[in-house]
Structures are given as structure tokens and as C-alpha cells.
Amino acid sequence: MSKSALDAIRTQVMWNRLIAVVEEQAQSLLRTAFGTITREAGDLSAGVYNADGHMIAQAMTGTPGHVNTMATAVGHFFKHYPQSTMKPGDVYVTNDPWLGTGHLFDYVMMTPVFLGRKLVAFFASTCHVIDVGGVGMSAKANSSYEEGTLIPHLKMRKEGKINEELLSVILANSRNPVEVRGDLLSLVSANDTGARRLIEMMTEFKLTSLEPLAKHILTTSEKGAREAIKATPEGKWSYEMPLDGYEGPIIIKSKLTIKNGKITIDFTGSSAASIFGINSPRTYTHAYSVFGLKAVIAPHVPNNIGSLSCFDLVTEPGTCVDPIRPSPVTARHVIGQMLADAVFGCLAQALPGKVQAESAGSIWILGLNSAHGRVPAHETAKAKEFGVISIALGGIGGRPGKDGLATTAFPSGIGAIPIEVTENQCPLYFKRKEYLMDSAGAGEWRGGLSQTIEIANREKAPFTISAATFDRIKNPAKGRDGGGSGVKGVARLGSGNAIPDKGIHVIPTGDSLVVELPGGGGFGDPKLRTRALVEADVKAGLVSPESAKKDYLLDV
Amino acid sequence: MNKSIKLAADIGGTFTDIVLEAGARRWSGKVLTTTQAPELGVIEGIGLVLEQSGIKPVDIGVFIHGTTLATNALIERKGARTAFITTKGFRDILEQGYEKRFDHYDLMIDRSVPLVPRTLRFTIEERLSADGDVLLPLDESALQNLAQQLREENVKAVAIGFLHAYAHDGHERRVREILSAALPKDVTICISSEVAPEIREFERFSTVVANAYVRPLMAGYLHRLRDQLRGMKMDCPLFLMMSGGGLTTLETAARFPIRLVESGPAGGAILASEIAAECTLPDVVSFDMGGTTAKICLLTNGEPERARKFEIARAYRDMKGSGIPVRIPVIEMVEIGAGGGSIARVDKLNRITVGPDSAGSTPGPVCYGRGGTEPAVTDANLALGKIDPAYFAGGKIKLNEASAKAALQKAIGNPLGLKDFWPAAGVTEIVEENMANAARVHAIERGRDIAACTMIAFGGGAPLHACRLAEKVGVKTIIVPMGAGVGSAIGFLRAPIAYEVTRSAAVSLDAFNAKTVNALLQHMTADARAVVEPALGKTKATVQVIADCRYVGQGHEIRVTVPVKTLTDANGKKLKAAFEAQYEQVYGLRIPNQEAEAITWSVTVSSIAKKPKRAAKTSAKSTPKPRSKRLIYDPALGKQVMVPVYWRFDMKPGATFKGPAIIAEDETSTIVGANFRAKINSLGYIILENLK
């Protein structure tokens, strides 16, 4: 074998190794985290950066909203802490929504890696901590000041010594200090794990710098993305998507331009920022709109700053997709996680027949707390105090040639939290969690089914639900190419009354919370669906005979 | 015990391997797997080695058996018609899974289809809370109705999984009791609290369902085998190899067949473990290639990594997350569809693809002449001269070289414009590349450098491909042990008789209650002893206790060894110290002033493993004499060359020669690549060293 062929293989091996290193970093985070949303649902991310702060590899474990925002978050640290001032053992932290990953709950931790005395790389990781003070996991605040404690770019560890003063400030401002401390320390140790492995790798391959490898990775990825973009037809397309919003409806306007190998997504003209916390900071907007573009156009090109740089974003400051301080942003994924569908609306015109229908989109985070302080004290006098999070997921849109996936997060990469884990943490219990019949948008390839979840309290006490993230209650996921809409979401009390808005609501003693998640839109004309598939769905109880007749024109 | 004669049988997807050992002497045989009635192949193979050895069935002291039947039934979806009964309101947990995409960017992924379709998933009113309170009593009145439905649906297996049954099994047991009275005798009933008593409902349900799905098949097979063996007057104890590397009784195996899924490969890992000890090898990659799959396992200081979770039958591009998760003790390894029977084709983009589907034993590769029309890896090896048609599987399976070549030409050569031996060369190169990639990724996932490992190659196919695979992944030294062709079966004979019992029980280490723990461990130890001790006779057993510990509030644990004795409250502190020390080693720091707890307890009772003999320095070098010559294709040289063929048993320790060459034996052939030197060590193992 020639030398250049051998070099190419060596580079490939090192690249693979780097991916294995960040995967180990992510696994370490998952295994040591305290908050269930991190350790069970996987709301985290991990990545490695070159000495200039450019992301060169990310872990598959994690979620795009974190990964793609972290890609730029690392660079922001340098304004306060130039690389030349960094020392071995330092760790830097922030949860600034605009400079981190979009809301105060996500702490970004960045660790410089030194080979001897030389700064060679950075590891960064993020996870969603369970509480940051303020109004909690709620969209009720009218400014980011009310949403909790913001930690600007600071040192979490100085030359190996944990910054206890900073830690005590963070913990003093959280309702769950034990979990938050555990999660912050687990971020620190995840980065350390990555750093240790990277140094081992550099020693093994006798590298004194990551630069040649980083350059290879970034240019190869950029080239791959550019080629994929070139293979997509040129033109301009636009789409408008209505969302429920909080105080009033939100319209997302998207405009896609593909020209000369350049691709731009422009959200100019979208609704002004909400006065409630559902706005998506630009960094988060970037994460999910670029995710949507890349998943359709260049899914197999590795995700790093090289490939991400091929996609341009235009936003208008002051809108819901580019709010300015101090706009509230806690439930930023209500808008942010809808942006993949907004992008698909344009792409479906550029690539007819190739883009999936709309999905439930924004995950419904069930923020469940004991009702202490929200009801007269005697009602909670004997009740246990608790705060837990569960994740409720709807359906994904039907796909060209395949039905949509049922009850699965999209575009978020997280998963559900096991019922048994949640019930071990609080007196709440699930009364049901089951597919919802007729929830999928009809189509030749139907949408993914959604589900019904019902939760009650074992104690004779009320509890509260934060409805901050419940959307698509008025605006369903639309079908594509003749497919029908998925079912709209529902949030109500077991006794009947609807949950009126995205605020925090009390579930009275003896009553329960019922949520029916939005279903995925259908793809293609339902009349083209084969009888066998419709019959199988009816037999399984996923589609009713009435729907078979009405939507598919079939007597089953 | 005067009955020191041991017998082992390993049923793979293609071959059934049999090994008989009496002291230092060993006989072995390879017959085709008889998929419809696997016991027939086993009996045939046993007959073969008994005839060779002149040993009578009554003289055999112990019979150890492993099989991939359960795995294959899961991959091919050929298990029993199974129903699943769960808590009312939770009919779809089994299908919803983790509710997570296993690839962020691929919008076309498919999830694993559940083994039990929605139409056979039933719910019953009952509900226990996390601490065992009855929130809803079990609706026993509905069970007769349910039994009627199950009879009408003609199900052969029933899995029961209720919420929180890992800790509170009352309702599951009651439902089993009522249903077993109401259902036909041949219907299997499994409960999640017995099969996998661990928290996290989806994984527990998935495990109990998989167990029920394969149990009728496995129990039926095992009992038929037992009866046949009795019929031939073989009345020795019969043990089954489990995926975690221990042995268990036939009755336990028939109840928990899911624990057998990777039993053959586990045997291979045990063999590799023994060889690593004999040859003092700190870093080992074992390469086990049979007729259907290739298995790659990494060992450190002779020990393979172990885990308590395994994913069977990955359905979407072999990707992690696309299979059926089961919570069972397993040896960590990667298995890919690359074996002698793996079928070669040309895809739409004119690329050669090999596997993952296999021609198996029926029809088998084209050269078997049993009706196969699509060329397989074995056909390519035959066409390249690497297999001598006269001696394949000890000469018991006749191979047709001409038909293999014709099929390769038609399926690969014609579409690609290749002639002569080149289609075959392309097929072997691709299968070797596939295995190299799988090995690299597996090593990387475990943070290991595969090039620093010594390769131990066994299974009928591995010695044919080991040199090329080693070149691709940078491995310098390969060991081909004695009996390589039937390596997993030999591994069975080295396995300890062991059984692991696991229970979930949260116990604080800071406020340690020794009384509760002692009671729990005593109970578990008794359960495990009951499985193991009848098999041991007078031999003593060892007990190992592990507590999976974590800081209170975390969701994942670290395995901490617990002293085997009556614990006192002071042991809590010691356990916490041990946990924190390990935690710091793995994650680099501790969480100060944080309470810790033990979540899951496991007790393993096992026989004491024998110390292996060490390889000694070999006597003077000698140059062996070849028996014949063959024309083979050498991929490193990129051309055909005439090479000497040595008979393995002609060579004495110390024999040394350079490749290219073939070393033939009954159940496999070792191809010595052009860049390699072969040497026989004191134990008779072939040591191949890359000279470049």
C-alpha cells in the first residue's frame, strides 16, 4: 500500500477515534447526571473543538438543539477569557441563553485541554438542569430576569480547584440544589473524561497538534455539504406556518434560497417576540433550522462547524426567532423545535415528493410540582414537596415510502423518561400512557400516532402542571402532498375542563391531568394507501372503522 | 470423580460442533446443523466422536451445550405466537420503546417491530405503586375472559409484565397462577419479575416478551435432546452455556432461554480467555467466524468485558438502537453477518456486498450441492484454493468446486466484468473489510487500540481469513489454538458452572441496614446455589456479590464488590468508600457530602475455575515437510501463487516456516499470508507473525 493510502487510513482512524472520545464524554455525562431529563431522556450534548474553538466532532448521544448551539457557544468564552490566559485545570461555565444554548436551564461547560503546556483543544458539554430559580419551567415570566439566575461567562474550576463561591450562588438560587450540584459536577467530569482520552490518543498517534486532523475533518465535511447543496435544485421558495403562541398566534415565515452552491434560510417577517417565554434566541433558531436543512440535503455529512458553515441564516432582531434581551425564553423550544417543519415547508417545494409531512414538533415537557405555595397552605399541609419532569411525545410526519414514527421526539433528539423512574421520585402516578386512536394524519403513508397520558396524585393533595411547552393545540401538524393533518393536541383535567393557556395550573385534589399529544401529518393521498395497511391499522385499533371510511374511503 | 470424560456441543446457524475430552486427549467433529430438529445433528455429531474415540455414552461424565437457536429465532422471527399482558392503560409501552430516534440526521430510520403485535397485547386492571401499595386491585374476574381470548387466538406463549413488578411481584404471580390453570398445558407463561427484575418498564417488558417468544421452541428442543440422550444411555448431567459465560442446568435454561442468546460466542470468549492466560497476553482480540456470523470480542488481562444489557436483531442498518433490548448478563462483543454461508451479491451501484443473510446449512453455499444457487463466502474460498474440497469438515461434506465458480461468475463476475478467480477474490476482500470495520468500531467504542492486541482466531472460518483481517486492522500476532475449528465448544468445557441472581432493592450506604441486606443476599445465594450445587457434586462453589451503587439522585450505577460474609451496619461506610474510590477512578471526581445507595444486588455462585497451564519455551526450531501443494490467491501479493500444504499434526512444537502456505486440519484450514511467519508453540498453537 502506498504511503498516501496509509496516511488516509490513519486519518480516518483518528477521526473515528475522536468521535468515540466525544461519545464516551456524552456517556459519562449520561451515567453521572442527576436530573432525569439528562440521564433518562438524554437532554445533553458533548463535543470536541480545536484550539480556535471550532467544533470538529460531536456525540450521537444528545440533541441537535444543544449540539448546534454549542458549536458557537464555545467561541463566546474567548472574549472574556482569551486562550492565552487559560491554565490546565480551568473549566468555564455559562447559562446565558443568548451566548449558550438558548435558555437558563442549559449550562454549558467548557474545558481547555493541554498537551504539556500547549493548549490543543476544548471539550464542551451541556445538560438541562432541573431548576434555576425564577418562575421555574414556565413561560410565565415577561423578562429573562424573572426566569432565573443567569451566570455570565465565569470559571467553574480554577487550575483544578472548584469555584465553591460560584457554586454556592447557583445552588442558593435553585429549588433542587442537590440535583443541580450533581449535574454541574457531572459536566465537569464528562469534559475531563474526554480530555483524558484525547491526550491518550494524541500520545498514541504521536500528535503535537490537532490542527492537521481538524483541518482535514472540516474541509472534508464542508466539501461534502457543498456537494450535497449543489445537487439540490436552485431557486427561491417560501412558507408560512401558524403556531398557537401564548398571548396570541405566532406566524413563522420562512424563505429558502439556493443559488451557486449557497443556501440561505430567512425568517424575516415572522411574528414579533412574545411577551412570554416561548421565544427562540437566534442561536437556537440556527440550531434547528440548519438541522432541518441538513437532515434533508446532507444527512450523511458529519455534523461539525465545517458542514454547518454552509448554511446561512437571516433573522430580524426583535422577532420570536431572534428575541433581544431581556425577552423571556425559558420554553424556547416551543418555537425553536417547530423550525424544522418551517424549513421543510420550503424544501418540499424544492424537492417535491421527498420531504416528510409536519410533526408534533416541540416536545411537551410535563413540569410537575407539588402545589405548595400555589394553593392555601392547609391543602398541602401533609403533602410531600416535589418537582419532577416527564417528557410527552407526539407523532412524526409521514415519510415518502414509510409511515411516520409514533410517539417519538423530532427534531429534538431526546427520549422519554421511564414511568417507573418518575414514580420512584414523587407521589404522582400514571393512569395511562397509550397510543391515541385516529391521531395520525391520513395519507398514503400516514403520520406517526400520538398518545394519551394521564397523571394523578396518590396523596390527597393537589399538584401543578406547567403548560409552557404545549403547542399545536390549535394548529395541527399539516400533511404533505394530499396527506391529512395530524390530530391537534389536548390538555385538560381528568374531570373535563381544558387547561386554558401556557401558564402553571393546579390539578385539584382527586383530579388528574390528561394530555393528548399532537399526531404527525400524513404524506400523500390517503386513497392511495393499500387496503391491507388500512385493515391492519383498524385491526390493531390505531385507526377506527369510521376514519377508514371517511379518510381512506374503505369499508373495513 | 472417575467420570472425567467431558462432552460439548455447539449448535451454530450452519454447523454443529462436537468435542469430546478425556484427560489430555480430544476428539472433535463438525456436522451440518439440522435446523428443523437440531437434536438430530447433535446426536449425529456425538455418534461421530464416540466412534472415533471408542468411548461409550455411559462413560461420559458431563455434557455441556450451547446453541444459537434462540438468537436465530429472534432474528428470523420464528418464535412462538406470543401474547403480552400488561397493566391497563399501558398497552403500547412495548412498542413505544425509548421514544427516541437512534440517528439524528437519518429521517428514514425504522424502529424494531415488537415481537408481540398490538392485537396480541392485552391489558388487565391492576396497579401497584413504586413502594408496593395497591392503587388498583387485580381484577381477577377479567382473567377467565382473557384466558378465553388467548385460547381463541391460539397463542403458545404468554408474557406478563406489570408496572413496578421488579420490586413487587404479587400481581404477576397471581395472574400466572390463574392463567396456567385456565390455559392449555403447552402454553408457556413468563413473568417479568422472574426474567428480569429490574426497574425501567420498557426494557423489562422487552426481556420477558423475548423470553416467552423463544421458550416453547427452546424448551421443546432441550427436552427432546434430553430424552434422546437418555435413550442412548447418556445419563450424565447436562449443562447449558449462558451468554454471560457461566453454565446452568437444563431446567433453568428451559425456563430462561433468553439467557442463552449468545451462548456459542460466550464459549468462544472463554476459550480466548484461557489462551490469553496460557500465553500471558494483556490485550487480546478474539475473532470467531463460523458459518453464519463473525464475532469479535476484546479481552484485557484475560478477562472479557461484561454487561447486563444486550441488543438482539438490529433491524436498521445494523445500527445501535434498532434492535430488541434485553436485560441479561452478557459478554460484550460485536457480531456481524459475516460467515462462510454469507451470501455475496452485486448491488445497484455495482458494489459487491456480502451478507448479512446466510445460506445457513440448508441450502448452504452452492458448493454443498444441496440446492443453493447464490454464491457464499465458502464458495469464494473454495474457488481461491483456500479450502481443499476433499477434506472439508473432515471430508464429511463433499464440495463441488465447479458449481461454486460458475455461481460466482454469474452473480459477481458477469455484472462487474471480472473473470477467473477475481470475482471470488472480490468477495473475500469485502467480507474481510466488513469484519475489519466492525472490529475497529467495536474497539473504538470501548476506547481500545486494536493494533496493540494479539488476535486469537477460531471457528471454522476464522483461520482462513485471520491474516488478511490482521493486516487490515494492524494486528501483528495471531494465535490459532488447537481445535480452532470447534473453538466455542472447547470453550464450553472451560466454563465454570455459574448462575447469577439479580434483585433490585434500594439500600442507603450512609444509613446502612445490614439486617435487610443479609436477608436479601441469603435468599439470593440460596437461589443461586440451588441451581449450581446439584451440578457440582462434592466440588466447592465460590460466591461473588456485587452491589450496583450510585449517588442518590443518579440513574446509573457502578459495580462494587461486596464482601461475602454476614454484613454489619459498619459495612455501609466501607461500601461507600469503595464506591467513591471507583467513582473517582472512572469519572475523575467525587460528589462531596452526597448520600450513596446500592440499587441492584447480584449474587453469582460458581465452581472454581482451574488454573491454566502456561506456554513454555519451545525446543529447537524444525522445518516441517509439506504434504502437497495448492494454487491459491494471496491478497497481500495480489496474485495467485503455488503454496505448500502442511498437515497440522505433522508439525512439532518449534516448527517454523514462512508464508504463503496452508496448514490443514479436519475442521478448518489456516492460511499463512505471504507477509507472515508461522511457528508452533509448546501447546501446539500456531503463532502467526507479520514480518512487515
Image: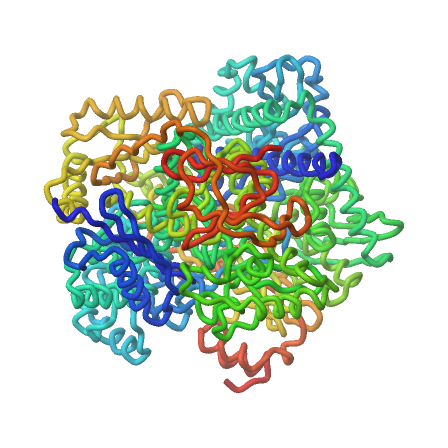
Seen at 41% across and 69% down, the residue is B118
> Which quadrant would residue B137 be assigned to in this image?
bottom left
* The furthest residue to the left: B538
* The furthest residue to the bottom: A555
Q: At which x and y percent is residue B483?
A: 37, 48
Q: Can residue A492 be seen in this snapshot?
A: no
Is A300 left, or right, of B30 in this rendering?
Answer: right
Image quadrant containing the N terminus of chain A: top right
- The colouring scheme, among rainbow, by chain, secondary structure or one colour, is rainbow
> Which quadrant would residue A151 be assigned to in this image?
top right
Q: Can residue A122 be seen in this snapshot?
A: yes
Front residue of B50 and B119: B50
Above/below status of A361 relative to B582: below
Front residue of A333 and B474: B474
Above/below status of B470 relative to A404: above
Q: At which x and y percent is residue A360?
A: 59, 58
Front residue of A112 and A381: A112
> Which quadrant would residue A375 be assigned to in this image?
top left
Seen at 52% across and 38% down, the residue is B443
**How many numbered marks have been drawn onto this rendered protein structure?**
0
Q: At which x and y percent is residue B185?
A: 19, 73
Is B18 left, or right, of A359 in this rendering?
Answer: left
Seen at 46% across and 51% down, the residue is B664
